[in-house]
Amino acid sequence: MNPVKPVFRILEQTHQPTMLELLNNYTPFQLLVMTMLSARTKDTTTIPIVKEMFKNYPHPKDYVNLPVEKIEQLIYRVGFHRVKAKHLKQLSRIIQTKYQGKVPETFEELILLPGIGRKTANCILNYAFNKSTIAVDIHVHRIANRLGWIDTKTPEETEQELQRTVPREEWINANKLLVGHGQTICSPIKPKCDECAIKRYCNYGLRGKIDLLPNHKWWGFLAQQLFKFSL
Ligand code: SF4
């Protein structure tokens, strides 16, 4: 029996909405911007910033003429705000001029926008356009590996392997359920396995394995992985 479905049914019972679910009444452009800004930034920091910013600047055309310094001021509390401000201005110009102000609905077009990687493109297809994709961030990667569904090192490998493991009709649930679980129970360090509703399905939880943080090489590897999974 495929292990994914019973796990997802349990996670639905304990699920806490993620940022993109909480703000699902926002436009595809706004969801794109908030996903880009949330990379390596806590949702609790990103949410109030974007809510305030979209009150005054809701459309891509608003950012086309806004000086990049002003955008930096608006988002200065998010991580890497300077580079994100530049990307926000550039992608707004492309969306405004090439796509008449509408966010494109294909992976191939989204991935070409400045600052948009596979994860963000798949998130937008998933959350804004209700398309079947698996958006792999650090939570999805970590939990799928701990559960023993896959054995992978990079986000690309994880995406490919999950596409094989997760039944197609469940792809749309994968990001929200695993991210929600990662933010509340299955944290990177010291996951709360004793409180976890899916422990009986989890290789890691059943083995009682602890996270080992052996040396600073590991931290370097972790920093690289965080960067890869954040786009
Ligand atoms: S048992 Fe532990 S490692 Fe496995 S999913 Fe639950 S919290 Fe994560």
Image (cartoon, rainbow, N blue to C red):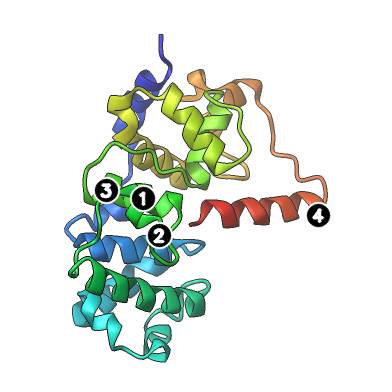
Dot 3 amino acid type: Tyr
Q: Earlier in the sequence, mark 2 or mark 4?
A: 2
Query: Quick one: SS at disc 1?
Result: helix
Determine which residue is flagged by label 1.
108
Point out residue 95 in the picture as x, y percentages from the top left corner. Answer: 26, 69
Q: Earlier in the sequence, mark 1 or mark 4?
A: 1
In this rendering, would 32 be left or right of 212?
A: left
Viewer-nearest of labels 4 and 3? 3
Q: Work out how far the residue at label 2 is from the one at label 4, CA to CA, in angstroms.
A: 34 Å
Query: Quick one: SS at disc 3?
Result: helix
Point out residue 194 in the picture as x, y percentages from the top left corner. Answer: 54, 30
Q: Earlier in the sequence, mark 4 or mark 3?
A: 3
Determine which residue is flagged by label 3.
127
Dot 2 amino acid type: Leu
Determine which residue is flagged by label 4.
216
Residue at image position (66%, 56%) is 223
